[in-house]
């Protein structure tokens, strides 16, 4: 089996009823993410922008035990040639690796024009937690949990965790989770605001599918602008967001779905959203 075929199996992709399913499938490594898997996932999220065959996305994993425990550290990385007496990992190399790998993946989810649902089927640790939290909606199986595992290994959190967590739960609670690295069961994640809903494990995929189909049959461009504005609001000042909100409203008003929304209201019927 070729490397590309292997990647296609480890990060599976299919579109069903206008819902794109991206599934981590690396059971031999507990669904850990290799660099190739990470880059394939980035490419998949980016490829969905501007397409018409998918109008919502689900990110999940196979099995019932693990969603994603983070990076697959057993896979070798390629580094520049060096003198014999140089260290195996030179200062600057981890930084470049993150800027070229983890960060583009997280940004590809945030910047995806379609709404993304994380279906967390099991334990998510380290980068796996942040992978889920970058999604627009998070649904967890009742046996699933999050672990900000970095402090257990003496490491600094990566994969934009220090960006997303304070925005979801505030800096003080973020420090507690990151300093102590305790397990965060699904019910506590719901209490904290780290997920939208907790369901029994056997109901996870049907429940996520219900949400995904509702999104995929909704006003896709309105969802796109809404996602962009909410994400932007975390980083810009009031004046900027009011200007950008005004442009988003104007642009969306030119879509067929916006016209359909007005017409269906006037005609007292359900709208037929086309996605453009």
Image (cartoon, helix red, strand yellow):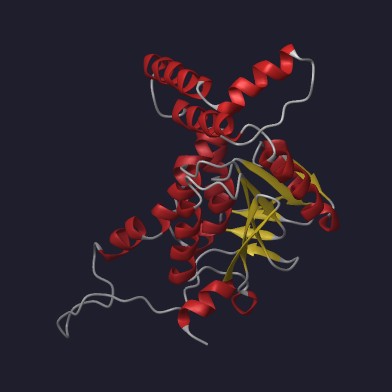
- Residue 87 pos. (x, y %): 23, 76
Location of residue 41 with respect to 237 vertically, above or below: below
- Residue 232 pos. (x, y %): 44, 29
Question: Which residue is rendered at x = 73% and y = 66% of the image?
Answer: 65
Location of residue 8 with respect to 17 vertically, above or below: below
- Residue 15 pos. (x, y %): 64, 57
244 vs 276, left or right, is left
The answer to whether one can see residue 141 in this image is: yes
204 vs 238, left or right, is right
Residue 244 sits in which quadrant?
top left
Q: Residue furthest left?
A: 83
Question: Which residue is rendered at x = 54% and y = 51% of the image?
Answer: 130
Q: Quadrant of the C terminus?
A: top right
Label count reads 0
Q: Nearer the viewer, residue 99 or 23?
A: 23
- Residue 117 pos. (x, y %): 64, 46
166 vs 22, left or right, is left
């Amino acid at each position: 089996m070729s490397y590309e075929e292997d990647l296609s199996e480890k990060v599976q992709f299919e579109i069903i009823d206008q819902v794109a399913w991206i599934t981590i499938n690396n059971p031999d490594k507990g669904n850990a993410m290799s660099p190739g898997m990470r880059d394939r996932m980035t490419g998949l999220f980016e490829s969905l922008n501007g397409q018409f065959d998918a109008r919502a996305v689900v990110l999940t994993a196979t099995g019932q035990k693990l969603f994603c425990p983070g990076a697959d550290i057993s896979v070798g990385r390629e580094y520049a040639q060096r003198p014999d007496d140089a260290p195996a990992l030179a200062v600057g190399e981890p930084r470049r690796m993150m800027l070229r790998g983890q960060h583009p993946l997280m940004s590809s989810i945030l910047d995806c024009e379609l709404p993304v649902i994380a279906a967390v089927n099991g334990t998510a640790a380290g980068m796996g937690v942040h992978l889920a939290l970058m999604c627009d909606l998070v649904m967890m199986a009742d046996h699933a949990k999050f672990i900000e595992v970095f402090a257990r290994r003496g490491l600094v959190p990566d994969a934009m965790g220090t960006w997303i967590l304070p925005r979801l739960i505030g800096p003080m609670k973020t420090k507690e989770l990151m300093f102590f690295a305790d397990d965060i069961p699904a019910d506590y994640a719901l209490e904290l605001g780290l997920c939208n809903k907790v369901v029994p494990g056997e109901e996870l995929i049907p429940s996520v599918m219900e949400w995904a189909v509702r999104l995929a049959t909704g006003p896709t461009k309105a969802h796109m602008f809404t996602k962009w504005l909410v994400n932007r609001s975390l980083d810009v000042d009031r004046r900027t967001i009011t200007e950008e909100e005004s442009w988003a409203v104007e642009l969306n008003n030119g879509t067929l779905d916006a016209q359909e929304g007005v017409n269906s209201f006037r005609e007292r019927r359900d709208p037929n959203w086309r996605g453009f």
